[in-house]
Image (spheres, rainbow, N blue to C red):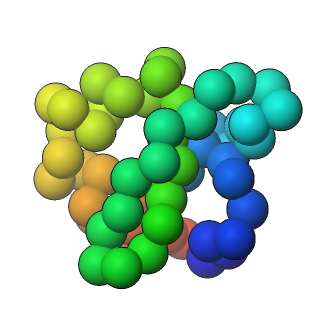
Amino acid sequence: MENDKKECLVCKRDDQTIPLIQITYRDTVLWICPEHMPILIHNTDKLMAMLENPSS
Ligand SMILES: [Zn+2]
């Protein structure tokens, strides 16, 4: 998982395309776009599963 690139962890759009919000999880910096903020807010379990298993 690339963590140095600024891109939404869900849709992979970068900050040239859409504003991104920085979050951190277990000392890893992650980015998420406003469109996917509801996942962050309402589906935290799903988000954490995605972070722990990026390929799934
Ligand atoms: Zn997104």
**Residue ID at (49%, 59%):** 30
The image position of residue 24, as x and y in percent, is: 36, 63
The image position of residue 16, as x and y in percent, is: 83, 32
Q: Nearer the viewer, residue 40 or 29?
A: 29
**Residue ID at (69%, 53%):** 6
Q: Nearer the viewer, residue 50 or 30?
A: 30
Outermost right residue: 16
Going by the image, does 29 lie left or right of 14? left
Q: Nearer the viewer, residue 44 or 16?
A: 16
Vertical relation: 29 (above or below) 22? below
Is residue 56 among the parts visible in the rendering? no
Vertical relation: 52 (above or below) 34? below
**Residue ID at (67%, 48%):** 7
**Residue ID at (74%, 37%):** 15
Is residue 45 among the parts visible in the rendering? yes
Going by the image, does 19 lie left or right of 44? right
Could you tell me which quadrant the N terminus lies in? bottom right
Going by the image, does 15 lie left or right of 56? right
The image position of residue 49, as x and y in percent, is: 28, 64
Going by the image, does 26 lie left or right of 16? left
